[in-house]
Amino acid sequence: MSPRLIWNGYGKAAVRLVKVVRDGPDHGLHDLTIDVQIQGDFADAHVEGSNAAILPTDTMKNTVYALARESEVAPVEEFGIRLARHFASACPASRSVSIGITVHPWEQAGSHAMIRGSAERRTATVTVEGEALTVQAGLDGLGMLRTSGSAFTGFLRDRYTTLADSTDRLMATEVTARWTYARPPADWQAAWTAVRTAIITTFTTHESQSVQQTLYAMGAAALAACEEVQDIRLVLPNRHHHLVDLSPFGLDNPDQVYLATNEPYGRIEAVVAR
Amino acid sequence: MSPRLIWNGYGKAAVRLVKVVRDGPDHGLHDLTIDVQIQGDFADAHVEGSNAAILPTDTMKNTVYALARESEVAPVEEFGIRLARHFASACPASRSVSIGITVHPWEQAGSHAMIRGSAERRTATVTVEGEALTVQAGLDGLGMLRTSGSAFTGFLRDRYTTLADSTDRLMATEVTARWTYARPPADWQAAWTAVRTAIITTFTTHESQSVQQTLYAMGAAALAACEEVQDIRLVLPNRHHHLVDLSPFGLDNPDQVYLATNEPYGRIEAVVAR
Amino acid sequence: MSPRLIWNGYGKAAVRLVKVVRDGPDHGLHDLTIDVQIQGDFADAHVEGSNAAILPTDTMKNTVYALARESEVAPVEEFGIRLARHFASACPASRSVSIGITVHPWEQAGSHAMIRGSAERRTATVTVEGEALTVQAGLDGLGMLRTSGSAFTGFLRDRYTTLADSTDRLMATEVTARWTYARPPADWQAAWTAVRTAIITTFTTHESQSVQQTLYAMGAAALAACEEVQDIRLVLPNRHHHLVDLSPFGLDNPDQVYLATNEPYGRIEAVVAR
Amino acid sequence: MSPRLIWNGYGKAAVRLVKVVRDGPDHGLHDLTIDVQIQGDFADAHVEGSNAAILPTDTMKNTVYALARESEVAPVEEFGIRLARHFASACPASRSVSIGITVHPWEQAGSHAMIRGSAERRTATVTVEGEALTVQAGLDGLGMLRTSGSAFTGFLRDRYTTLADSTDRLMATEVTARWTYARPPADWQAAWTAVRTAIITTFTTHESQSVQQTLYAMGAAALAACEEVQDIRLVLPNRHHHLVDLSPFGLDNPDQVYLATNEPYGRIEAVVAR
């Protein structure tokens, strides 16, 4: 007796979708991870090797991006209903379609900038070496994102360069900062807050020509904000968001639908001092 | 020529310290991870196998908890200075001592409860099966902690039971919730917020006899808060915080200094329905 | 006095490169993560916002793939030297270039298949319910990869399909398996090994028309290998490897240089029973 | 109508158990993570706040360690059956008991030492600075464990010291190593293998007075094994394994049953050079 296929399901997991809503003075942002899972009569694919009933998971991914362009993605329950009904129709062999959506929260920080309400942590490092005492304060994991005001043009080009000039790209990062006090501030907590505010305000308002320039401006603002700070090291990963090409589906994409990536990423680091 | 030891350092990493401040009507909470690193003249330990100059890293851990009892831990920069100076003196062979502190942020939620401002995420799962449509909303990673109002007594005992009754323990969890709508609410976002608020309010105010009882009360409150919700599944890991025994150091510990743990943890799960 | 830039560096981190060496009967595989970091005189970019000296990190990524096509990538030290010298020359403002390479190990398993020597774990789940006893054995995290013998053609197409038929693609997965015993085998360890061997042998030898078909064949082989197994659940994520388009650099890419991805991934799951 | 409890379960997750089998010339090692989950009639605990039917999850943890002392833990399926039956009896309100076991694999490396067959990775870092070329090779994540031959005695003691001298403790670590070549070796791969072998052989055979001494001996052996290596940096976290106190249950524990921990850990680091 041949082995029986008693249950099966397939789909695309972890489709990373960022949609920017640009229809008012304040931009909106939706950062979602989407899973598509289909169950149904796919015995032929498993047993016979025929894929005629299989909607490719690559198509599922394309569809998520295309429908995100064609409709609202919030409330996510409604976007989920739209996706589920689409795939139920697009894949006739399906018996059930399940859409899972995880929302990654961001908070508005100015009209065109957001802060991720996530895993930010305050840090302190104290070193004693004989009589010398060094106190370094810092923060880790401060996620921020700009929807406008970030350019990257006029860079060095060689045989391997394919990147085009961009005068208005989406810029996302997760700041690590470490600053050293020349002497103890009157209030450690107030000093920490002042530097953090300087970093955030610079990110959200600076007209950026590069991550490097924004980083330097952040460092300069931190030094201006707290006179006891003698230097600051900043690390800014450049978390790339790729504008999705929707033209194969007859759709434009006026800076709205992005694919968020983790790897690879640009890594920009510098120390700014008085 | 024998191999030269050209640099060395050692210490204790990832000491997990939670301190509850109970001196006012509102309890305060400090949740820290602390690293101690010492450099100095420890060639004898490396080359000769003599440990006479080595302050054990276990002692470093003990010291962190004892000093947390004896002094304030905030601002963390000052606590770091105190620790660094202590180890510089306690370990005569040290040349430099470095203390790293990471602050895990919590927000006050009532007088005796906190919410972790961290990795909480909203979720939605939509399933279409023929004509049937199921919409499930939810949240992941909602960290919460009570500093009072949580007991666990009168449980089943057997040969392997060492746990004592507790009438006032620290209770910490990270809620996962999934609820199903019997029909679409008028406003998906408002419905989600109402359920989340019910979960938080119950946690922060419920006089708890067990995690199970709190879980059930949360579920009941969620059903009361949103009439479209037909059932709710709740998973509450019990993240144990052990009161540190400071008596070997001649110190008491009146519910102040805790060791936070990840493994093992209690896992409580139930479904509550109309 | 304006803030001084006292140190800076930038580069591309986490470039995921897989190279298949197909010049003998046994295929070779190199799975690398590469970091490029440049330090030098980039003050103009930071302070003035001029990018004229900046080689984009996107170009660094392109270069890694192009040089991987043009030369050997092993030993990795030599590939690192080649990359470092290339960027020192391609970026005149650089003062130092550092290349970090991490090798992800794979073991040969047949001529055209590899097993990842990684985080595989054996699992067991035992459930007692009244008199009923169920024993489920399993494995997690068994990474496997085929360099030939995997096709995906003739699938359902719609408006959103862009995927082309492939008669010979790279297939990579990380198997999760759980099988239930109808009765205790004579030797638990031998039974576990027999099922694991059946899974590996099927993956490495099966002429695959889809992940679904390979999954079913694995399940059938497991049932054949151990008569006490009554059913087996298999989950096979499809870890996509994209053939890199090197034509902008005047290079072909005859199934050699791939970009390995984590998100999104296909997720294929089924239960096969007697 | 009051909310109905329609499903519930609870238990202890992530109980970390290491058992050393010392009954032959070669020691055996079982490294397990165990989950206990009970379902049954616990409505009173949820609705009424009565814990009379609740076996504490702390007791479940104790029981795992005690039964690990009293019986074999391999094959894990049989240990799982024993645990499941025990809890079915110890908790009369249970209807089903489920035991999940994950096996963390180790390979024998000598009579009293093991290597973890896990996430080890080879690394290389190449830096070009003008004419200067530096090549550093390395490895990450090499897990190793000794079941005998490791002591720690005669250390510095102060008011906060509670650690007792140990003449034979379990020592576990996860080596990170980075070594620099003074000039290119004839064969990069052979050089890497020679250094790795020196590290492993030293760990498995060295009579250790401290992690520091073992680290230094490893470094010395690496320098001896490859004449092109000019220096080597080694980082050895001390992954503590606590001997479980079974005396409350009337059991001894002759260096057999351990609790494996992640946090905190000792961190030992040094550079050894010619």
Image (cartoon, coloured by chain):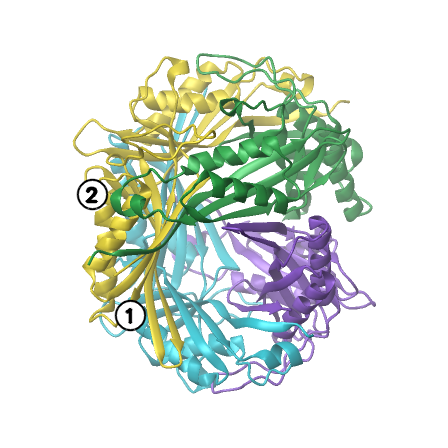
Chain colours: A yellow, B cyan, C green, D purple
**Which SS class for mark 2?**
helix
Chain where mark 1 sits: B
Say which of marks 2 and 1 sits in front. 2
Q: Position of residue A183 (x, y in %)?
A: 26, 72
Q: From what the image shows, is residue C149 above or below residue A115?
A: above
Q: In the rendered view of the protein, which quadrant contains the N terminus of chain D?
A: top left
Picture coordinates of residue C52, whole percent (x, y): 33, 37
- Horizontally, is A83 left or right of C200 in the view? left
Q: Judge by depth and name the residue closer to the eye, D246 or A235.
A: A235
Kindly state the secondary structure of the residue where label 1 is placed: loop
Name the residue located 45 percent from the left edge and 34 percent from the top edge.
C59
Q: What number is the disc on residue B75? A: 1
Task: Please report the residue visible at 66 percent of the width from the left and 63 percent of the height from the top.
Answer: D18
Residue topped by disc 2: A205
Q: Could you tell me the amino acid type at mark 1?
A: Pro
Res. A239 mark: none
Q: Is residue C50 above or below residue A120?
A: above
In the depicted structure, whether residue C262 falls above or below residue B15: above
Residue C126 horizontal side relative to residue D160, left or right: right
Residue type beneath disc 2 = Thr
Q: Nearer the viewer, residue D68 or D43?
A: D68
* Total numbered badges shown on the rendered structure: 2
Residue at the far front: name it: D131
Is residue A221 visible in the rendered image? The answer is: yes
The answer to which image quadrant residue B68 occupies is bottom left
| Residue D274 position in % (x across, y down) | 64, 69
